[in-house]
Image (tube, rainbow, N blue to C red):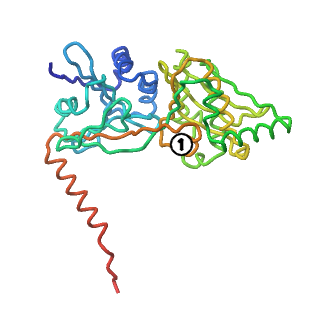
Amino acid sequence: MTIAWTLYPAAQLSRLSAKWNTLNAESGNLPFLDTAFLLPLLECFGSGAERIAIAQRGEDAVAAAILLPLGRGRWHTFQPSQLPLGAWIARPGDLPANLLPALIRALPGITLSVGLTQLDSRFVTPPENGPLIDHLDYIETAWVDIDTDFETYWNGRGKNLRTNTRKQRSKLENEGIQLALDVLTRPEDIAAALAEYGRLEASGWKVGTGTAVAPDNAQGRFYRAMLEAFCAQGRGEVWRYRFGDTTVAMDLCIAAGRTLVILKTAFDSNHKTTSPATLLHQDAFRRVFESGSYDRIEFYGRVMEWHTRWTDRARKLFHITAYRWAVISQARALAKRFRSQQEAQPVLSQE
């Protein structure tokens, strides 16, 4: 049975929520690809040019995307920096290579290519590169499997992590500082929690980049609306770590099914010598392991050194580009080869 794509303005996502969320639950069930995440994301970071595309085979929805035009006949998945993967969902077995040709024909105008950004190899198999489709490896992302008790997991961590954490706890406790983990899950607690989170970010490098969370910027408005929605559904958590009455580290987390995703981590740089984020994660991970509520903790982002202290698991994220005609990919390949040759040419002296 053939695939038929239907396009809608992005403003109709709320009306399409039931269909979108049902398909997401069948396609990996990632919390940030739920409309509870995507609706405030579009509100705060959308341009108004986005289109929702839904593919049906007969009466069944098999894939969906939020797409943004790039100009000159190019489209790509909507993905501001707050969204860990591109806004693409598809049932297992419905591969992009089989779905994208019909999508290219369905988009307005003469669409030359469609790009799917940051796909997860856990759910999408990278296609073989060919004249009409290619993939490009992007980064590796890490996760923690919750398949044992916490003590076994902790004893499997590196000796340096376990020793340094023990020393930091002993030092703080000998100074009379009480360590405490708070898990905030009520919607009414989110506004104040994000104000604290913004203070932590402002103590570090993000304060000069314009990406720090603040109550009066788009970042702050998005995270507040999104986390309040997830907490109202019992799927949002803010981990707050305190030295006495002072908040020193925080994580923003959301969940779907048996997966918990850590979206953002911040700590007070004034306390960095005592490793507050490490102490937070030890206590928070212990709680997650003991709760029995989840099978995995996902980091979703480039593998950082601190991730490798907590896990040795990593997998690829990648991009896909599909072309209307083979000549387009061939022209791009020639242009790329020409640029590489030009860059490799020696610079001649002007003397």
Quarter of the rendering containing residue 90 = top left
Quadrant location of the C terminus? bottom left
Q: Is residue 328 visible?
A: yes
Q: Which image quadrant for residue 150?
A: top right
Q: Please name the amino acid that badge 1 sits on.
A: Thr
Where residue 117 sits, quadrant-wise, is: top left
Please provide percent x and percent y for residue 239: 64, 28
Position of 87 relative to 15 (above/below)? below
**At 21% across and 53% down in the image, what residue appears?**
333
Looking at the image, the residue that sits furthest to the bottom is: 351
Foreground pick, 159 / 22: 159
Residue 289, percent from left and from top: 60, 23
Dot 1 corresponds to which residue? Answer: 211
- So how many labels did they put on this image? 1
- Residue in view at x 61 percent, y 19 percent: 185
Between residue 307 and residue 80, name the one nearer to us.
307
Query: Dot 1, how many residues are within 10 Å of its Cα: few (below 14), some (14-19), or many (20+)?
Result: some
Q: Is residue 272 left or right of residue 185?
A: right
Q: Percent position (x, y) of residue 308?
A: 55, 42
Residue lying at 21% horizontally and 52% vertically, measured from the top left: 332
Instruction: Note whether residue 226 is visible.
Output: no
Observer-nearest residue: 349 or 277? 277
Mark 1 falls on what kind of element? Answer: loop
Q: Is residue 191 above or below residue 348?
A: above
Estimate the x, y position of residue 337 in percent, counting from the top left. Answer: 24, 59
